[in-house]
Image (cartoon, grey):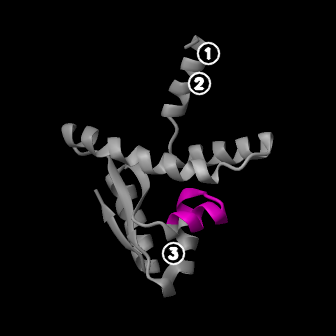
């Protein structure tokens, strides 16, 4: 692999969820492609490696997991998810409809608790791991 590709890969690894969503949006617009099918599989594979590394270290980073969204509360939860993640309407809707999903990885304890409270107030079932 060339050093240029390695550098790009290292930069991608350092992105948080908001930055990754913004990157996907920009790539879709620039290259006129739809990454919605690929983003679902990418989101499924990423959380699998996170718990193993955070169990070894002292617990300073937390994952916010959207466990369940009752049908009558879906719209209000969708609004909160969009405000917390910066995702577009379609991406946020897909995330809310495919629970359980990791909403935020590596959040500080305060941020994770704030997100949990906002989502619970909107009617969602949330777990901080």
Answer with the quarter of the image where residue 91 lies: bottom right
Q: Left or right: 86 with respect to 51? A: right
- The C terminus: image quadrant: bottom left
- What is the CA distance from the residue labelled 1 to the residue labelled 3? 40 Å
Residue designated by label 1: 4
Residue underneath mark 3: 77
The percent coordinates of residue 126 (x first, y second) are 35, 69
* Residue 82 place in picture, x, y as percent: 58, 64
Residue 102 on the magenta segment: no
* Residue in the picture at 57% in, 49% down: 39
Measured as percent of width and height from the top left, residue 11 is found at 54, 28
Question: In percent of the image, x 31 and y 65: which residue is there?
Answer: 127
The stretch drawn in magenta includes residue 93 = yes
Image: 86 above or below 33? below
Q: Are marks 2 and 1 in contact (CB under 8 Å)?
A: yes
Secondary structure at numbered mark 3? helix
Quarter-of-image position of residue 2? top right
Circle 3/circle 2 CB separation < 8 Å: no
Callout 2: helix, strand or loop?
helix
Mark 3 surroundings within 10 Å by alpha-carbon count, few (fewer than 14), some (14 through 19), many (20 or more): many
Above or below 88: residue 69: below
Residue marked by disc 2: 8
Using the rendered image of the protein, determine whether residue 82 is visible from the camera's viewpoint: no
Residue at the spot 42% in from the left edge and 45% down from the top edge: 45
Q: Is residue 113 left or right of residue 90?
A: left
Q: Main secondary structure of the magenta part?
A: helix
In the image, which residues are magenta?
A: 83-95
Quadrant in the picture for residue 123: bottom left
């Amino acid at each position: 692999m060339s050093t240029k590709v390695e550098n790009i890969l290292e930069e991608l690894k350092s992105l948080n969820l908001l930055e990754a969503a913004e990157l996907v949006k920009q790539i879709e617009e620039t290259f006129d492609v739809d990454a919605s099918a690929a983003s679902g599989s990418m989101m499924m594979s990423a959380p699998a490696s996170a718990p193993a590394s955070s169990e070894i270290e002292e617990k300073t980073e937390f994952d916010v997991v959207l466990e369940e969204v009752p049908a009558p509360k879906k719209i209000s939860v969708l609004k909160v998810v969009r405000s917390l993640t910066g995702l577009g309407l379609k991406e946020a809707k897909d995330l809310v409809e495919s629970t359980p999903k990791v909403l935020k990885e590596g959040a500080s304890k305060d941020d994770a608790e704030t997100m949990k409270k906002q989502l619970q107030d909107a009617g969602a079932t949330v777990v901080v791991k």
